[in-house]
Amino acid sequence: MKVLVTGGAGFIGHTISKKYIEKGYDVTILDNLSTGKKENIPDGANFIFGDICDSEIIKKLGSFDLLSHHAAQTSVTFSVKNPLIDARNNVFGTISLLESMKGKVNQIIFASTGGAIYGNIKKIATEKHAKNPKSPYALNKMTGEKIVTMWAKQNKTKATILRYSNVYGPGQDPHGESGVIAIWMKNILEKKPCIIYGDGNSVRDYIYVEDVANANLLSINKEGIFNIGTGVGTSTNELFQILKPQEKATYQKARDGEIERSVLDSSKAKKSFFWESKTRIQDGIRLTFSKEKRRKNKQ
């Protein structure tokens, strides 16, 4: 199977690319390295430096059985401050990519967000839950879903939408504004204070990146929209205590665009392609912390 992974030098994309390579697939990674890193490109992958808006590069890549579209602007707070840049990446970039792939792909897996697209959730959200985006990022991801679905129908291509909850794990960038676990781990290792925005009672569904990669593998040849989460909510205060018990965090004003509660029901993915999250938050953080400590010691 030939696979094109956009954003394959990024945190989630490179983990998925490794999983495809382990399965024996022929993997090509397209990444402009704006946030991805060249050292993330796994052995065995073909790497093309380029942007998803560069139609000339994409048209030269040839045909693929699967397009795994993970190139994106992923920060909610960045999107609030820079909505045009977010739209350029997550809406216009997706349109440009698809138009360049006409007649050249059999299935699209589109990385979307269940952690933002539904807005505040009182209990737990299935795929039928009303969408209520609170940020340009969430709105543009919702638009991206509709673009992919419409384009796939017009071009007789399978479309698979995976709505991730809050993904974490080894290799996540700690220098941006998203990915609180990566940011806190970096600060803890460097003996710097950890900041909680708001009162710390906001709840998220944190999912380990290897579980997300498995969902991408199992959903090949499956069509539809699927939540990819654990179904377990963890407050920011609880998360901090898992990371650094008996310590105190620094509290600051809540940031614009953030939601209060988001937990996903992934039973549809379990029923359709036998996927479910395998990693408890405590175990995932322990694995991530261990790998990040080893990485830091090698520097």
Image (cartoon, rainbow, N blue to C red):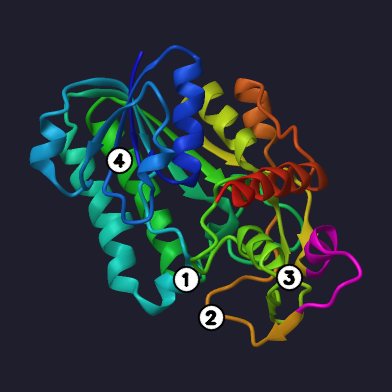
Tell me the kind of residue under disc 2: Asp
Residue drawn at the location 54% of the way across and 64% of the way down: 178
> Residue 234 in the image: x percent, y percent?
79, 58
Question: Which circle's residue, 1 or 2, is located before the other in the chain?
Answer: 1
Callout 1 crowding tier (Cα within 10 Å): few <14, some 14–19, many ≥20: many
Q: Determine the CA span between mark 1 and mark 2.
A: 8 Å
Instruction: Name the foreground residue: 32 vs 96.
Output: 32
Is-magenta flag for residue 230? no
Instruction: Name the foreground residue: 271 vs 57.
Output: 57
Question: Which circle's residue, 3 or 4, is located before the other in the chain?
Answer: 4
Q: Is residue 162 visible?
A: yes
Q: Which quadrant of the figure contains the N terminus?
A: top left
Q: Determine the CA span between mark 3 and mark 2.
A: 13 Å
Q: Determine the CA span between mark 1 and mark 4.
A: 23 Å
Give the residue at mark 2.
256
Task: Tell me which segment is drawn in magenta.
Answer: 237-249
